Amino acid sequence: MAKMLDQALTDEELDQLDQFLYSDAVGKDAMSLSMLHGYLTAILIGPAQVMPTEWMGQIWDKPEAVIFALPEADAMIDLVMRLYNQIADELAQDPPVYEPLLYWEDDSQQHSSIEEWSLGFCFGAGLAEEEWQPLLDEEEGQFMFMAIMSGSDDEMRADMEREGINLVQHDNEIAEQLPEMVLEIRDFFRNRQISEGSKHRLH
């Protein structure tokens, strides 16, 4: 099983997890696959160690006891953990090969929808809201977080529309920048932790 948890998900397994998350078994407001990807990304690059026991239950729209009792529960939870490990591995590679898992607005695959991924990312950051605050206190950090948030925040999107911003073009531009922003946010927290560790050693 340990070996299996290190294996990246195949396209077929991603489809299986996607279908499970959309099924009645987990509730109508469970996360989508793209939302889950953004959620796990934020957990992995954030400053706080959030254990699976803390974040797993937020995926579903039903109590964990109900989910765990399902016949396919073990297989689906394994897929979630493998996705978590896969994202961690993509972020750790040098150079990183991380790409957000986004949906397409149409069959042309030219217009990315970042809404679900953005929702998941913001939700994941919200699990350690206090620890994420230093990023928002920095101008560049706030800009990146707000850019990600603009993919799903209704008020921000309404304001952009009033300003004449083409939301489809905006979302495509943000989608292209997401891998770089994810890495920059990760590095911000890494460098901060190194700096804080140095201060403690000096004392």
Image (cartoon, helix red, strand yellow):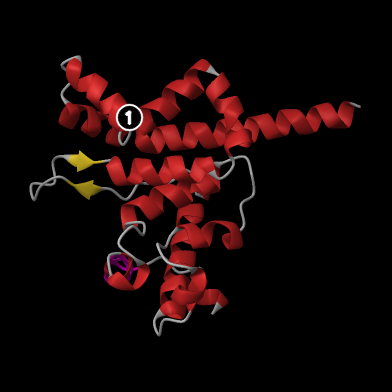
Residue that appears at 15% across and 45% down: 105
Q: Is residue 50 visible from the viewing direction of this image? A: yes
From the top left corner, tell me how far across and down residue 143 is, in percent. 43, 21
Q: Residue at x 75, y 30 (%)?
A: 196
Q: Residue at label 1?
A: 150
Residue 27 in which image quadrant: bottom left
Question: What secondary structure is found at the residue carrying circle 1?
Answer: loop
Q: In the image, 60: left or right of 162? A: right
Residue at far right of view? 203
Residue interval drawn in magenta:
10-18
Q: Nearer the viewer, residue 69 or 44?
A: 69
> Image check: 108 left or right of 126?
left
Q: Disc 1 residue type?
A: Ser
Q: Position of residue 111 (x, y in %)?
A: 15, 39
Say whether residue 98 is visible: no
Q: Residue furthest bottom?
A: 71
